[in-house]
Amino acid sequence: GAGVSQTPSNKVTEKGKYVELRCDPISGHTALYWYRQSLGQGPEFLIYFQGTGAADDSGLPNDRFFAVRPEGSVSTLKIQRTERGDSAVYLCASSLGVKDTQYFGPGTRLTVL
Amino acid sequence: DQQVKQNSPSLSVQEGRISILNCDYTNSMFDYFLWYKKYPAEGPTFLISISSIKDKNEDGRFTVFLNKSAKHLSLHIVPSQPGDSAVYFCAASAGSGGSNYKLTFGKGTLLTVNP
């Protein structure tokens, strides 16, 4: 079956611009996660959704970052007033339930010039 | 402050030999540990996991060992194959603390298996 998909695969933007990154989880998976992987680092947790609600957004670095999952499936990570330090690969993962294995998408590589 | 540490950025082994990847952690609340494998331009793929109530878990060529007193785990791959060449991430979560979904990753180890 189809895995987790993320669009776009690459995004280049200018400092100060707004970006949206999309995640399509595996069908039927109720839990969805966003991670950020900076160069030379492992993925870092950003936010976890159970259904439509953000159950834990403690990893979001500041209020420029926001994520939604309005219908409990597709999720969008939104970054306002992008900064060069936001450049990273943004990974989305989903799992059947919160205690189940997390399956990752290929990521979106964001570059802020 | 790195709570999960993979001190070897890279490892090179010959095909057919054993690969041993190491991981140390500092957070005593971690009670579930995972290994993910990552190929370039792909997302991490789950490989194997272990709960803190066990000290060993085996799945085919992959075995994970956990030493809780030393806060250390290792992944053994026997025999190593060229297709195993990838970045391996160690990850941990604190399930009993209610945050079993929040994975904390190490920086990864690049494994190269030479034919």
Image (cartoon, rainbow, N blue to C red):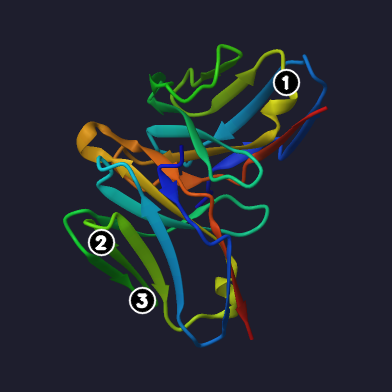
- Disc 2 with disc 1 on a shared chain: no
Q: Quadrant of residue B51?
A: bottom left
Foreground disc of the pair 3, 1: 1
Residue type at tag 2: Asn
Residue at 71%, 13% (x, y): give it: A81
Give the chain letter at badge 3: B
Counting from the top left corner in percent of width and height, residue A90 is at 61, 35
Disc 2 marks which residue?
Answer: B67
- Disc 3 with disc 2 on a shared chain: yes
Mark number, residue B60: 3
Q: CA distance from mark 3 to mark 1?
A: 45 Å
Foreground disc of the pair 2, 1: 2
Q: CA distance from mark 3 to mark 2?
A: 21 Å
Foreground disc of the pair 3, 2: 2
Left or right: residue B26 compared with residue B47: left
Viewer-nearest residue: A19 or A22: A19
The answer to whether the residue labelled 3 contacts the one labelled 1, judged by CB atoms less than 8 Å apart, is no
Residue type at tag 1: Glu
In this rendering, the answer to whether A86 lies above or below B78 is above
Counting from the top left corner in percent of width and height, residue B115 is at 64, 86
Q: How many marks?
A: 3
Badge 1 density bin: few <14, some 14–19, many ≥20, Cα 10 Å: some
Badge 2 density bin: few <14, some 14–19, many ≥20, Cα 10 Å: some
Disc 1 marks which residue?
Answer: A83
Counting from the top left corner in percent of width and height, residue A62 is at 55, 15
Residue at 28%, 49% (x, y): give it: B32
Left or right: residue B105 compared with residue A12: left
Counting from the top left corner in percent of width and height, residue A34 is at 51, 32
